[in-house]
Image: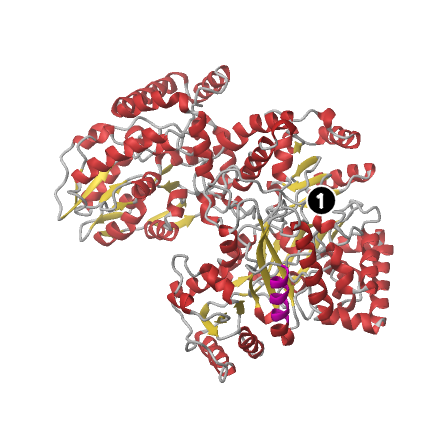
Amino acid sequence: MQTTAVETLAPAYRELLEALRPHFPEARLIHDPLRTLAYGTDASFYRLIPQLVVRVESEAELQRVLGECRARRLPVTFRAAGTSLSGQALTDSVLIQLGRGWQGAEVLEEGAAIRLEPGVIGARANRLLAPYGRKIGPDPASINSCMIGGIAANNASGMCCGTAQNSYRTVRDIRVILADGSLLDTADAASVAAFRESHGELLASLEALATETRGNAALAEKIRHKYRLKNTTGYALNSLVDYADGIEILKHLMIGSEGTLGFIAAITYRSVVDEAHKAAALAFFPDMATTCRATIALKRTPVAAVELMDHAALRSVQDQPGMPDSLRGLPVGAAALLIDVRGDTEAELQARLAAVQGALEGIRTLEPLTFTRDAETYAGYWKIRKGLFPAVGAVRETGTTVVIEDVAFPIERLDEGVAALTDAFRRHGYGDTILFGHALEGNLHFVFPQGFEKPGEVERYQALMDEVARLVGVEYGGSLKAEHGTGRNMAPYVELEWGSDAYTLMWEIKALFDPDNLLNPEVILSRNAELHLQNLKPLPAADALVDKCIECGFCESVCPSKNLTLTPRQRIVIRRELARLEAQGEQRDEARLEALRQAYQYDGVETCAADGLCATQCPVGINTGDLVRALRHEDSQGQARLARRLGHHFSGTTRVARSLLNLAGGGRAVLGEAAMAAFGRAARRASGDRLPLWLPSLPRAAPIRVLKAAPGKGADKVVYLPSCATRVFGAAHGDEESRSVMEITLALLKKAGFEAIIPAIPGHLCCGMAFQSKGQFDEAAHKARELNRELLAASQNGRYPVLCDTSPCTLRMQESLDERLELLEPVAFAHDRLLPRLDLVPLDERVALHVTCSSTRMGLADKFAALARACASEVVVPEGISCCGFAGDKGFTVPELNASALAGLASQVEGCEAGYSNSRTCEIGLSQHGGIPYRSILSLLDRASRPKGGEAEV
């Protein structure tokens, strides 16, 4: 990939780069224009591009970077997931990015506590604690994407944790690296003792500040008042009134410090109970004042969460699929509370429900208050709440961003605060603002679209924020940042909210920890009154497929290329930058534009698996794979004729593929696996990586002739469509399972009493996905039409269901074929239709399971796991493996994508006898990198089953 010449860096950064090179692989010292922009982007509406990005994998590496930066007085910023909203993960200096080495997690004391490194995604921590009926306290809406480092450094909270279960309240121990490179682990007595010896002056100064603060009665009372609310504005001054010991003060100051006081290398949380019995009600009230009175009444009850939504918020989601009809009939001014009640036992839940009902007696509702225990309805209520932010993002004008602010009012003044805010929005021209939030804490989010390009827009935004700051922070004594962190966004307003005494105290704290002001400067504390109006992120129109992206980063955790090149968010960021540069005409930076174009071909296009998993996480439903396929379509117009020839002679195409597999198998037999692998690598290098890579896991050719055997007779019929992959790739060399997927499927159908109908020309059929993924849309559509015709004929126009043995192909068929066809995916078919017709004899085996992207997108993960657990005594689902990255043929043509996506798989499946999935090409890559054979899940079911009422097979 083309990179920026080192000479273009400022001298100090050039020196830093040279100093780090002996200690870091070049791939982790990033200074090219594409990746500095991509990796330097976060979820805020600010943009700064780092001079250098350093990906660190250990504490020693991080300490080295800090030392070299300190020697040159170069500022540094720490970066985890980049889902923060206030600009605290941005820099135009050195960005320290966490690599894979920061994902350690250890459950302690039977789930009572958990030790987590900063690269652990929050949801993973909860999955580790789930067997113990516990979870971590913080529960931000981004928990499936954000990382523990950001959760702790921002003191992120969420819908249920309130102020009692946030990181400040539930931290037990912390491991931190300070600006001078020193390390303190409060869980290690020896570390604490050594730190007291080496940093006694720092600890004494903190203790003196605490004594001084507690002695200032007015300031101490103000601090206590502020932290009765949710508050992440400024530093955690409550540590100075809550604790007297310097170690405890330091530990708690680190929470919410946003990387400005040090780096959190690990944190130990006291976990909280995850109550199993849950109920929820969606209560509608005639106006906001009544809604706020209900909230105050509920504050005294044992509720888990109370979420407020104003009428504009409810109206923004009323037309989305799955929303209750009652949303459309609400009178103007109505509002709602989503009330969630939980209990550890059924009796406890019922007692709490009774308390809630009693508290709301006499308060008028538009409908009777009814709690649901139905899981689907319960999830639907929360879908309303969680859909509010993306609802604004989805309908905003292209080129504008979405601003989400979060403030907190004293709950007793919540109704006044809401009215005052609403009036301010109206007067400043923000009539489309929606309000929602965590009502019990007086915590309100307000969301509105905002453009910064048109004249007067920056000034209008500034006038609004000035008034909001005065209104919330001064007039109502509330918090300007309740849970999103101060960042750059509210740094100019910290003194306004806290007053000069507290503000001076914060600068004293900063000076004690970071006297050179090198750790994330301009975040939390800034002397720049206009900081929040500078370095605003451009969001130009790039492509209608992705223009609604709000760059939140929720997609990144499931992307298979996230550790290799770019994520979906980053692909969109670069497309926007290309569009911005192209729109500048003669004024554009041609060198930068060409560098981005060249680098994007590999980083953005070639290494995208286009698996669609990003759409499952995206709050506005963007499938970045659609963009990549469209770009491939533009680039591959010259290959349309070849694609048409291959598609129109597809039987011959697959026959040639099987012949090549036989040839490769012969070479393997003659040369041996090691020599064949070396030959394959050499051939690929000699071709300039144009030839596909030969893999040791490359299977035998499939025996297509098995489809010509007479179908078994059965009471029920099913059309069986073997995918082109299973018609080409047979069993793996040396695997105990020597049958092809076709043979296994036919055997299972016969065993279960189904009669298999094979379409008339099976060797010629294809769903078109192989062409679609390469941007050959015309031939993909032709193959889909052809398949549609043959399946309608075989199924007698949909009379009989159609089973495809490959999950991704089934999803493609469901999206593109006639709705009369009942198209069945192998896992769903096996779980729903085969299991009831078979007797199971579970195997005493430890097996691994890979849930493919398509199965996830079709909502089949639970059925997949249930099917495997019905067939084997122990099932391992590897953590953090979403898409395998094989992506049809990319395991051969871009093998590094498959390798990156499956890094860590082998250690997780060690001890498993085999792995199982539902896509033959995926199984090739999984076998290659897992160190165990991967097979079709249908093989496991066939081995573990016998005909209903029949004898067990030996």
The percent coordinates of residue 693 (x first, y second) are 45, 23
834 is higher (above) or lower (below) than 313: above
Query: In which quadrant of the rendered image does the N terminus lie?
Result: top right
Q: Which residues are magenta?
A: 417-428
Residue 763 appears anywhere in the view: yes
Crowding near the residue tagged with mark 1, few <14, some 14–19, many ≥20 C-alpha atoms within 10 Å: many
The answer to whether one can see residue 259 in this image is no
Left or right: 17 as drawn, with respect to 734: right
Residue at point 42%, 25% (across, down)? 636
Above or below, 133 against 100 in this view is below
Give coordinates of residue 692: x percent, y percent: 43, 22
Residue beneath disc 1: 77
In the displayed structure, does residue 284 sit left or right of residue 809? right
Tell me which amino acid carries mark 1: Thr
Residue 371 falls in image quadrant = bottom left
| Image vertical order of residue 341 relative to residue 713, above or below | below
In the rendered image, residue 522 lying in the magenta stretch gets the answer no
Give the image location of residue 946, x and y in percent: 22, 48
| Magenta span: chief secondary structure | helix
Residue shown at the point (86%, 67%) measured from the top left: 212
Q: Residue furthest bottom?
A: 362
Q: Position of residue 500 (x, y in %)?
A: 83, 63
* In front of the other: 699 or 693: 693
Residue 26 in the image: above or below residue 625: above
Quarter occupied by the C terminus: top left
- Where disc 1 sits, the SS reads strand
